[in-house]
Structures are given as C-alpha cells and as structure tokens.
Amino acid sequence: MLCPLVADGHELSSGRESADSLWRSLTIDEVEVTARYPREEPVIPVQRLEGKALEALNAYSVADAVRYFSGIQLKDFGGIGGMKTVDLRSMGSHHLGVFYDGVEIGNAQNGVVDLGKFAMDNIESISLYNGQKSELLQPAKDFGSAGTLYIRSRRPLFTKDKAYNVEVGMQAGTFGLAHPSVLYEQQLTEHVHLSMNASFTYATGRYHFRVHKVSPDGSMAWDTTGVRQNGDVKAWRGEVGLYGYLPQGKWHVKGYYYDSEKGLPRAIIRNVWTSEQRQWDRNIFVQGQIDNTWRVGERRLSVLLTAKYSYDRMRYLNPDTTLLYVDNDFRQQEVYVSGAFRADVFRWWEMALSADYIYNHLDSNKPLFVYPRRHTGLLALSTAFHYRWFRLQATALGTLVSDRVSRPNGLISTAAPTYQRVTPSVALSVQPLMGEQLYIRGFYKHIFRLPTFNDLYYDILNTSLQPEYTKQYDGGIKYTKTIPLQTSSLSALDVRLKADGYYNTVSNKIIAVPRGNSQYRWQMMNIGYVEIRGVDVNVGLTFHFAHAVEWSMSGSYTYQKAQDFTDPAKPEYGGQIAYIPWHAGSATTSLRWRGWAVNYSFIYVGERYHTSANIPANRELPWFTHDMSIQKLWQLKGCRLMTAVEVNNMLNQQYAVVLNYPMPGVNGKVVVRVMI
C-alpha cells in the first residue's frame, strides 16, 4: 500500500516520488532504507552536509560550510569578499572539480573556483567526493578531477492545496553586512515547476585586527594593529529555473547571473595596509540537464544529457603607479555538451559510456594577447559489478585537447601541442556482514589537470608545459547503525563512523620560478613533485529523546604529511608543503526541541609553514575558532518565521589563514526568514 507523503498536515505533490522531495520534507523523521544489494552505497568515500546538519552551521557561503569536511584546507584571504579556494588532501585547488546542480563550473583562465561567491540562501546540500562520484551515469567531465565538490540548489516542492512558495530573508551583521534575499516558487503544472530567487550582498569589510611575528629567539619582531581597509563588496545574484518530472526521470533548465565589485585588501607588510586595488566579476550561465530511465523487465537503460553556455568577465585594477599600473579585462566563454548512457547487462553488471565536448575561449585587453581557444573531447567507459556483499567499479577516461592561438597584426604565436591521454580508476567495496551497515572499501585513481590559459599564455609563452599528474591510493571503512533503545527518555541512537588512510603523489607540478635574475618576471615550469600521506576520520552520534528532543554530535580529524620532493639540492627538500598542517579537525553539536535549535561548532588548524622550507622563521602558529548560534522556527497564521542569532570566533582569536592576511575577530549576525 502506498501512503501519501505528508508534512505539516498537508500531502506533498511533486509529480513523482523522488529523493529530492524526501529531503525537502524536513519535518519527517529520518528513515533508513535498505535495498537488496548495496547499489546506492558509495564505493568511493563521500562527505555530505544537508538538511539539519547544514542549517546548524554558521555558514554564510559554501566556503564556510566545507571547512567542516575532513581532508580540506581552505585558503581564505579574509572577510565577506575575500577570495576562498579549497585544497583537497594537499593536491592543490586546481585538482578539485566544483559542480553546481550537476554541471561543472569551468574556469579555463586560471582553473580555480572562488567558493565565497556562493551564498547559502538556496543551497540544499553539499557533497565532497575523493576521487569521483560512485555513480556510473554521469558526464565524462565528472571523472576528470582528483576530487569533486557537488553543490545542489533547492528544488521546488509544494503541498497539495498550495501551488506556490514565497520566502523572504534578511541577514545583517558586523562589518556592515546586509544581505536581503527573496525566493518565489510556482507550480505551473503537476509536472513542471518554476523557481526564481535573488539576493544582494553589501559589506564594508572593515574589521579590527592584530598581526604580530615572533623571532626565532622568542623576541617580538613586529606587532601591528589596525582596521582592515579596502575589503568592501557589493554583489548581486539571481537564478531562474524550470524543473520537470518524467514518468521515470527528471529535467531542469537554469539561468544564473552574478555581478560584483569589491576591494582587494593588501597583505599587511611593514605597517602598510591601505590598498586601492579593485576587482569586478560578472558570471552568467545557462545550463540544462535531462535524466531518464527506461525499464525492460528487470533491466534498465538510462540516459543523461547535459548542455551549458557560460560567459565570465573579470576586470582587475591596480591604480598604484609607484608599483605598476594595471587595468586588465578578461572575458571567457565556454560551451559544454555531454551525453551519458548506462545499461544493465545483467542484474549484477552495469556498463556506461559518456562523451563530452568543451569549447573555451579567452579574450583580453592586454597588449599582444594571444586569444587562446581550446577544444576538449572526453570519452569515459565505466563498468560496475555488484553481488550482495561485493561491489567493483572501474573507469577508463580518454582525453583529447587541442589549443589554438592568434595575435593581432599578423604576429606569429605557437599554441601548446595537441594532447591525448587515457587514465584509469578502480574502486572496490565489501560488506562483510550482510546484517550490518559495515563497508570496507578502497580505490585507485590516476588523473591529471591541464595547464590553464594563464599557465600557458598569460605573459611569457610556456607552450611546452605538461599536465600535473596525480595518483591516489585510498583504503577505509564505513559503519552506520541505528540502535533502538525504547527507554522512557531515549528512543534511539544513531552511530556513524568513517575512516580512510591514503597515499597521493603529484608529479610534473606546475610552479612559478623567476626568469633569469629578475624577481619581476616569472615563468611557469614543470619541476614539482609532492608525496602526501594522510588519515581522515569522521564520527557522529544522534540521540533521539522523548518529547521531540534531538541531540546530535559530529567530529572530523585529518592528519597529513605532505612533503615537497622537488629538488634535493634545496633546503625545502622533504619539508611539509606550504600551509598544510599536520593536524586539523572540527566538531559540531546541535540540540533541537520543538522548533528551537542551539548549535555549536569548533575548528582547529595546527602548526604549519608558509613555505616548504620548514625553518622557524616560516612557522605559522595553530589557530582555532568557536562559533555558536540559536535558532527558532515560529509557526504563525499563514506563514512560518525563522529567526537566528549567530556569534563567530567567540574568543576573538587573532589569526591568519594566509600569511599577512588577517582574519576577522569576534563577529555576529542576525538572520530572519519568512516562509509563506
């Protein structure tokens, strides 16, 4: 017998039963579903934040949320507008693919995605995969990174007696933060839904800081206090999406617009912290995806089609003529199409084939610019075997890349040579006890990242650059269990444990070296080699008490030994690479009762060095932060009201993630959301 899905006394209508709908019905208790074979259990390690766990974090942007994943190092230049990039297991930010609603956010110019641009207003879940996602039905591009971060936006959901949703929010906080947002969802037909949302961010970015440096002999080398300057930001964001359901599938089409102007605060060096550098960003994309499955008896045939066009413009201005006047304007375009097909050969054997084509073009106002164009073809053949307690997945990815360049006035330039490679990955998962959710797993992946347009063509042509190669070896366990207790005060206990050990290498690493005796002109070269050994541990407990009381706790710990073995003749040989701590971790806890929630989180980053030369002068002290928030959901006539008060860095710790870029001290925020 099928029962209607009910939330707040209303039957939910989504056009079909879907995982998206289940996650949106937040008032329904968590239910564990077990299938005949562990098809949905990821073979490759995944960390995910969604639902209550995501709401409990004092996260303004996606970058703030991913700090709680193990194996992550966040490079943060401070403030709301400061650039924020992510390094996964010390392989470098370029090796992490970032996907928004199933499509990668491309950046052929420099290969890095600023996660600080993505506010949390409309984010439903964030998932981090080491290696790649375990699904076979995905674009070939999804197999092409050493790690992947998936950001999923909210998909509309309606009650049966109400065909629209409206949500208006406001966040206000220290450093001049004002962030209004609005969301409107409309059920056009039973199977087609419309979603529109927009937000505006304003912040002065002015916060007090203290930066000091201790000499190796223990004396104070220098001590600076002041107010952070030129950290203001103004940013507009808008999205429009159409979402549809098919009898055995779904589709969506989305348009996205982001426009910002911000100041770029300088490094605090020699008691100087004023800056006039500015940056303007405009990001526009239109993307669509259709996912459908046909069933023939017990066999399945699935198709996933994806298309995207994006236009990105970035202007950088440095008006300081005492150094070097710079006013650079870059415009890049990308066209992306993909087709993926999956079929059941037998009940225990699946095969998939994915083919992608990507076109990138970069334009600029720089003199003698070479206007690079890149054609990329990707072909992935993957297979999976699953029989009761055993699952094996393997993929071979073929890559073909061809660059073209042109210069004005008939000047001759040579593009990088055509590049083609085939790289493999294999993953294995074993469930030794069929009655328990215990999995032993491991994977191997060999992949690379191509040189970006900046690496190859920015100033000095480096067309002989080769890709950076990574090799990943991972082994670990995952265990989850719900223990029914049925006592007078405690009804159940959820236990979660994940632990992985890994060994990674990065070879042909692209690094900047000075050209000749000049410290002004630098050249990119393939001379780096890094070895990484590490352990990631994640634990979680959730207590379900009587009277609708729920108490959850989670923690993560990372140990990494990431050594630079580039040049035996240099003092940094064998040293821990820059900004990678040996020890790091986080902890969160949340207590919920009848619409109230009290949340606490803690982040710790241990000792590290700002270069691979691990000498006392380069040592950076450990830092930690404590954050806390109180939330309340009010049920009012005809609407719901959510209010929250957040306090971050409660102990006012003075620290810097990047040398000479101080982070904010104690700060706070008030959040109000009205849902109609």
Image (tube, grey):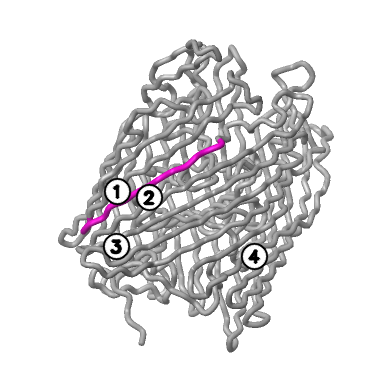
Do the residues bearing badges 1 and 4 touch, measured as CB atoms within 8 Å?
A: no
Relative to 657, say whether 487 is above or below.
below
Question: Which image quadrant for residue 633?
Answer: bottom left
Q: Secondary structure at mark 2?
A: loop
Residue that mark 1 sits on:
169
Report how far apart the C-alphas of labels 3 and 1 lie in the structure: 30 Å
Q: Nearer the viewer, mark 4 or mark 2?
A: 4
Q: Position of residue 418 (x, y in %)?
A: 82, 48
Residue that mark 2 sits on:
121
Residue that mark 4 sits on:
428
Q: Nearer the viewer, residue 456 or 295?
A: 295
Do the residues bearing badges 2 and 1 touch, measured as CB atoms within 8 Å?
A: yes
Q: Position of residue 655 (x, y in %)?
A: 44, 27
Mark 1 neighbour class, 10 Å CA radius: few under 14, some 14 to 19, many 20 or more? some
Which residues are drawn in magenta? 582-595
- 507 horizontally vs 284: left or right: right
Q: Secondary structure at mark 1?
A: strand
Q: Residue at x 75, y 24 (%)?
A: 570
Q: Earlier in the sequence, mark 4 or mark 3?
A: 4
Amino acid at circle 1: Gly
Amino acid at circle 3: His
Amino acid at circle 4: Leu
Q: Secondary structure at mark 3?
A: strand
Q: Nearer the viewer, residue 331 or 324?
A: 324
Report how far apart the C-alphas of labels 4 and 3 lie in the structure: 34 Å
Report how far apart the C-alphas of labels 2 and 1 lie in the structure: 8 Å
What secondary structure prevails in the magenta region?
Answer: strand
Total number of numbered labels? 4
Amino acid at circle 2: Asp
Residue that mark 3 sits on:
544
Q: Residue at x 41, y 57 (%)?
A: 50
